[in-house]
Amino acid sequence: MTALIALFWRDLRRAWGSGALWLPVLFFLLVATAFPFAVGPDAPLLARTGGGMLWVAALLAALLPIDRLVRPDRDAGVLDQLAVRGFADEVIAAVKIAAHAIGFGLPLLIALLPAAALLGQDGTRITLVATGLAIAIPALASLAVLSAALTAGLRGGSAIGGLLILPLAIPLLIFGAGMLDPSGRGAVKLLAATSLLLSMIGPFAAGAALRGLRE
């Protein structure tokens, strides 16, 4: 248990070290600054489409640290040492998912406030986006760790990982953006169900991928 706690805190320090804590914040602000130039000075259109753009930015922000989620531990032999000590790969994957969810999720929610303001979102829409992201963050973390485990042994793994995670995350994007529609009250339930399903499957699928790295 001590080794797993140490792994959790090390992954969290790695996520927040060397300025990485601010990456989601800067990414969100860049998106929020650039998107109005593409849409133009139409404030109602910007307010209508800004929420969906925030969801796309959140999905892409989850991909930023894929290279450092599994590959460094594989190269340093950490995964082998944990396996020798009897820790199940699924448990290791679950710890990494929890660390990643906190490591990128908290900065993401903090960055949401100024980014949403730049995109002309009112308080109600900001609350809906924040609620949806809070529900979806565990699922996004599960998909990110799964993709990182599947591509840790490949050159250019981050690009391939992005191709893997994007199709799987489309339901989160659809239901999350659907929450912003006044007629989409059932979207939050579908989002929660999808996030729960992906969060439950994630540790087992990522654990199998970690096992494959050692074979």
Image: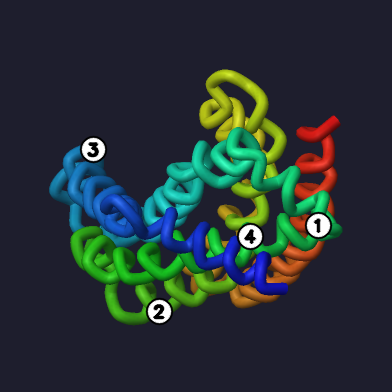
Q: Earlier in the sequence, mark 2 or mark 3?
A: 3
Q: Left or right of 33: which side holds 50?
A: right
Q: CA distance from mark 2 to mark 3?
A: 25 Å
Q: Secondary structure at mark 1?
A: loop
Give the labeled residue for mark 3: 38
Q: Nearer the viewer, mark 1 or mark 3?
A: 1
Q: Secondary structure at mark 3?
A: helix
Give coordinates of residue 168: x percent, y percent: 69, 44
Q: Nearer the viewer, mark 4 or mark 1?
A: 1
Disc 2 marks a residue whose amino acid type is: Thr
Q: Which mark is residue 97?
A: 4
Disc 4 marks a residue whose amino acid type is: Ile
Q: Secondary structure at mark 2?
A: helix
Q: Nearer the viewer, residue 147 or 169?
A: 147
Q: Earlier in the sequence, mark 1 or mark 2?
A: 1
**Total residue callouts:** 4
Give the labeled residue for mark 2: 127
Disc 3 marks a residue whose amino acid type is: Ala
Q: Earlier in the sequence, mark 1 or mark 3?
A: 3
Q: Earlier in the sequence, mark 4 or mark 2?
A: 4
